[in-house]
Structures are given as structure tokens and as C-alpha cells.
Image (spheres, rainbow, N blue to C red):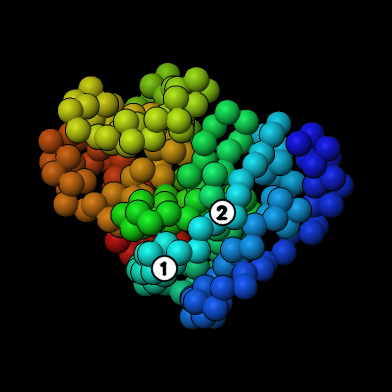
Amino acid sequence: MKYLLFLLLLFPSLVYASCDNKQLQELSKKTGIEIHCNYSPYEYFDEYLLSQCKYISARDPTLGKVNITNFSQALNEFVAAYPPQAIQKHLTSIYLLSGFKCDKKRIGGTVSGKSIYLNLTTDLEWLREALHHEFSSLLWRHNQKLLTKDEIESFSGHSAYGNDEQLLYCLNHSSECANGDKHDVLYEQAFLNPYGKTNPENDFNIYAEHLFLYKERLSKLSEKYPLIKAKAERFKKFYRQLGINL
């Protein structure tokens, strides 16, 4: 694996789109987003992603009927939720894979440059969440002057966020950390679930999921917890500044 990473670091410019699945090719044409489905470490991972891991690995995505159908539905819904110019400016490619791991961390999705990396799954709800979740990272990373890390932290306080060990735990126990029920202490600190508490970007990602997919739940929490309301309104402003109305 070390030898493989060495070769990839020598050739970071080889990242290239490829997908020989007809349905996904048609979906790519329809949405204007390059969809990669022929997994190859030489073509998938760029220099930034390699710099984040000592060891990085993945496998081919499972291109079963349900996987493709659910991904197509999720992607079409996702694209329809944003103005075309927001997608065109910030997202060029989606890389589909499975078994994605960075060191000891199991990764469901991540971003680099203007690309989203996703484990292809049959879980439609997860795919919906993941697309908004990862796209919010692209929006934020390319527009941090509009919403700084310090400003995100100001709602809950810098010390309220976790550490690398907590992040590792959440990545490897995703269902537990995604559960927002019965977390009154977190709500009072303006966190929607334990994963959002790991770092400011993940905090913003979880709010993005709620702003687009779980508006009723966010509204109810906002009525009860003033900090959640204030943080949600600030994130809405960020989207409006990018021409994305919520």
C-alpha cells in the first residue's frame, strides 16, 4: 500500500472520469455532473485526499439495480434543490466506490476540490443526506469568507467540539452518532447530534442535511432551543449569500 501511495503522489494529475454503466452515463448527461464508477486508485484519489491518509483504500461500487435506482433518485432530487449555477460552480464530479477507508476510519463520503466521493449503497435516505452533507462542505470550503470557522464555533464555543478520538469513534459508529434523540445537553449547545459535535465543518454538514431534508424537525428544535435557531438562521444566510434560497 505504501508503494501504491508513492506512485499516486508522483502522478496526481491522472485523476480522470470513467464510468461504463449506461444508466449512470445518462444520469451524468442529465445532471451535468461527471459520474465515476470504474474504481481505480490511480484515477480516483488526488493529492489532497492522499495527504489526509497514511493508507487509503476502496473497492468497486456495487452497480446493482437498487443501488443505481436509488442513487439516480437521490441525485435528481439533490440537483433540483439548488440553482443550476450553484451546482456548476462548485461540483464537477461524483466518484462512486465501496469499502472506503482512510487509515482506521471507515468513510461514507468526503470531498476534494470540486468532487464528492460516496460509498454507493441501497439506502436511499442515506444517499439523500450524503449528497447535501458533502456538497455543503464544497460550498463552505470555497466560500469561507462568507462563513468563517470562528463564526461557526461562536455559537457553541470552541471548547465544545470534540477531538480526533471522538471523530474516529463517530466514523466507526455512524448510526449511534447520527442519532439526535434524547440529547438535550447537545441541543442546548446547538448541536443536532453527536457527529455534529466532532468539528465545525461536520456541525455545518449536519445542519445542511436538516435545512434541506428535515425542516420540520429543525423547526421544532429551533422553537425550544434558541441557539439552534440562531445557528440555523446564520447557515440559511450563508446559503442565501450564494443564491440558494431556503
Name above or below for residue 78 compared with residue 193.
below
Position of residue 77 in the picture relative to residue 36 (left or right): left
Report the front residue among 82 and 69: 69
Q: Quadrant of residue 9?
A: top right
Residue contact between numbered discs 2 and 1, judged by CB atoms under 8 Å: no
2 vs 1, front mark: 1
Identified at 79% across, 59% down, the residue is 14
Identified at 24% across, 52% down, the residue is 214
Report the front residue among 243 and 85: 85
Position of residue 14 in the picture relative to residue 144 (left or right): right
Q: Quick one: label 2, few (<14), some, or many (20+) residues within 10 Å?
A: many
- Circle 1 residue: 65
- In terms of sequence position, does the residue under pointer 2 or pointer 1 come before the other? 1
Q: Quadrant of residue 188?
A: top left
Position of the N terminus by quadrant: top right
Q: Quadrant of residue 96?
A: bottom right
Judge whether residue 158 can be spotted in this image. no
Horizontal and vertical percent for residue 136?
45, 52
- Circle 2 residue: 97
Horizontal and vertical percent for residue 208?
36, 50
Identified at 17% across, 28% down, the residue is 182
Report the front residue among 167 and 190: 167
**Amino acid type at mark 2:** Leu
Position of the C terminus by quadrant: bottom left
Q: CA distance from mark 2 to mark 1?
A: 16 Å
Name above or below for residue 83 compared with residue 44.
below
Position of residue 191 in the picture relative to residue 69 (left or right): left
Report the front residue among 54 and 195: 54
Q: Quick one: label 1, few (<14), some, or many (20+) residues within 10 Å?
A: few
Judge whether residue 182 can be spotted in this image. yes
**Amino acid type at mark 1:** Lys
At mark 2, the secondary structure is strand
